[in-house]
Each structure stands twice: as C-alpha cells, then as structure tokens.
Image (cartoon, helix red, strand yellow):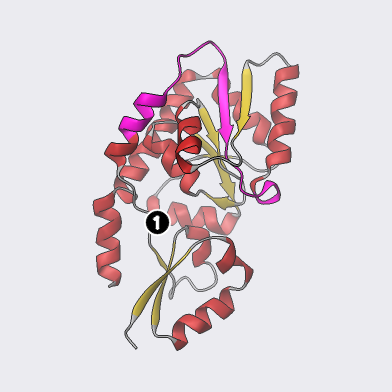
Amino acid sequence: HKPALLHHHGSLFRKDPAHMLTMAAHLRMVSAVSTIDLTRPDPKLLNWLPTAYDLDELAAFGKEHTRKRDGRILVVSAPTNWAYKATAELIAAVKVLQKDGVKIDLELVEGKTWRESLAAKARADIVFDQVAFGYGCNAVEAWAFGIPVVAGADEWTLAEMRKRWGSLPFYTATVDTIGERLRHLVESKDMRAEWGGHGLEHVRKYHAEKPALAILAELY
C-alpha cells in the first residue's frame, strides 16, 4: 500500500499501454519509460527514465575487447526480434554493398550471454540497432565504446527526441535507406568518428549513473 515507481521497458508496454497505465494508476504507481517512443501514449503522464550504466566500466571493457583493424568495416547487430529490428533488410543491404565491392562484414549476435554480446559490440566499427523505435541498450553500450550507431524511428519519436535533446545521437535510417547509411559510414572514417562522438556525448549526459539517478531521485 505504498506509492511506487513502475519503469516500463519495450514490448510488454507497447502491446497494451492503456492497460498498463490503468493498472499503474490503480496501484498508485508513478509511470516511467526507458525509451522516448514509449512516452507517446501519454507524454504528460509518462516520464523518461534513461537506463543507467557504469560508463567507466564499459569503456575499460571496450578497450579490452576491441579488435585489430584489418581494412574491412564490421557491422554488428544483436536482434531480439528480426521483424522489429529489420534484420532481414539489414542482411539484404549488406549483401548488396558486398556485391558492389564495399569492404563490409556483418555479425549477428544471437543466443549469447550479455557479456558475449557486449564483446561483439566492442569489436564493431558500426552497430545497427533498429529503425522503428529510436534506440535501446544496444546503442547505449556501443556509444560507451565510442562506436557509431545506425537507428531510426517514426517522425513523432524523432521530433520528440530533437525537442528534448536538440539533435539525434544516432545516424538515422529507414527500412529503405539502411544500405545508403551504412555505405556513408563505411566510406568515411571521419563520419564514423563524428557519430561515435555524438553517441558518447549523449550517454555521458543522460545514461551515466549520476545523471540517470538524478532523474530517478526527482521522480521519487
């Protein structure tokens, strides 16, 4: 019978937000969400509470597991659901680029432990998240390593992100432009460094433990 904070993550909330919000109100729970797209059912009621990470620990892990560059660009994706994550479209786009002679490789991380998945992302030159919801933990972890992320979202979510942050931390793509975006990053080391830098700045500002916990404290 005490007030509580309910932090919504991903698919469970997306399936039936009205039910989840009704349940939370009945139980006197303050509702927070892990990603900006999840605020859409009620932007005034739903608070964005970014997932907190120990960025120093991640940076050290990234240095330990980085790979020696070999002239090819490695794209890593860790899909939990191929349909949601546009995995088939990603594979098709990479095959087209390879056929065109672009020095690009793709690694899909599935059925691995979290640390194994993390090590794969640390070896990447580019991480592909998905193009439907903005970004999730895959992107945050990649940014902590200074690795650029390709992601996307619907126009409402992108506009909400720009309003909150002033700019986007990921290199935007749609289902139809995955190959084009990857080509840009593969062919430009400067672009990879630039977007990796944008992402690292973003996680330091919002997903590091102190700023994330400051938001949590305010909600409490």
Mark 1 secondary-structure assignment: helix
In front here: 207 or 36? 207
Q: Position of residue 165 (x, y in %)?
A: 39, 51
Question: Relative to 127, does residue 18 appear above or below in the rendering?
Answer: below
Q: Position of residue 129 (x, y in %)?
A: 56, 42
Q: Which residues are magenta?
A: 59-84
Which residue is denoted by mark 1 in the rendering? 164
User: Is 212 situated left or right of 184 in this image?
Assistant: left
Residue at point 49% right, 40% down?
A: 170
Quarter-of-image position of residue 57 = top left
Quarter-of-image position of residue 213 = bottom left
Does residue 110 appear in the picture of this structure? yes
Say few, some or many: other residues with alpha carbon within 10 Å of mark 1 (under 14 / 14 to 19 / 20 or more).
few
Quarter-of-image position of residue 25 = bottom left
Question: Relative to 74, does residue 47 appear above or below in the rendering?
Answer: below
User: Is 199 situated left or right of 177 in this image?
Assistant: left
In front here: 71 or 100? 71
Question: Relative to 132, does residue 68 appear above or below in the rendering?
Answer: above
- Image quarter of the N terminus: bottom left
Identified by mark 1, the residue type is: Arg
Does residue 176 appear in the picture of this structure? no
Magenta-colored stretch includes residue 79: yes
Magenta-colored stretch includes residue 10: no
Q: Position of residue 150 (x, y in %)?
A: 55, 37
